[in-house]
Image (cartoon, helix red, strand yellow):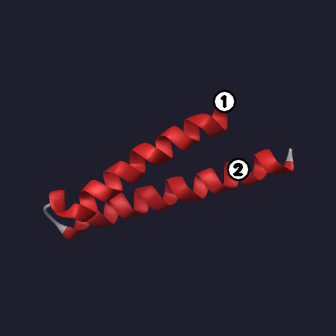
Amino acid sequence: MYSMANCLLLMKLASMHIRTRRGSAHDGKEHAAASATFRLAEIRLQKSLLVAEWL
């Protein structure tokens, strides 16, 4: 259940990241923030998947 929620969050963040990269963001700071948020979610998902595999 927890990893499914992470997957859904990652998909949502990925769509936000793609929209930002396409130019809907008006400045570089917004793009940088979206990229950082996306990367953080990616790292959290990888960590949770590693824990799930370990269990």
Specify which label sits upstream in the sequence, 2 or 1: 1
Please, what is the three-letter code of the amino acid marked with disc 2? Leu
Residue 6 on image: x %, y %: 57, 41
* In the image, residue 2 above or below residue 53: above
- The single residue placed furthest to the bottom in the displayed view is 28
Which quadrant: the N terminus? top right
Count residues near mark 1 (Cα–Cα under 10 Å), then give few for <14, some for 14-19, many for 20+. few
What residue is rendered at 56% in x and 35% in y? 5
Please, what is the three-letter code of the amino acid marked with disc 1? Met
Residue 38 on image: x %, y %: 44, 57
Q: Secondary structure at mark 1?
A: loop
Task: Name the residue tied to disc 2.
Answer: 49
Is 28 left or right of 45, judged from the image as shown?
A: left
The CA span between labels 2 and 1 is 12 Å
Query: Residue 35 is drawn in which quadrant?
Result: bottom left
Is 28 left or right of 40, judged from the image as shown?
A: left
Point out which mark residue 1 bears.
1
| Label tally | 2
What residue is rendered at 40% in x and 52% in y? 14
Query: Residue 42 is drawn in which quadrant?
Result: bottom right
Q: Secondary structure at mark 2?
A: helix
What residue is rendered at 49% in x and 47% in y? 10
* In the image, residue 42 above or below residue 27: above
- The single residue placed furthest to the left in the displayed view is 26
Which quadrant: the C terminus? top right
Residue 52 on image: x %, y %: 77, 45
Count residues near mark 2 (Cα–Cα under 10 Å), then give few for <14, some for 14-19, many for 20+. some
Question: Is residue 12 visible to the viewer in this orientation of the structure?
Answer: yes
Is 31 left or right of 50, judged from the image as shown?
A: left
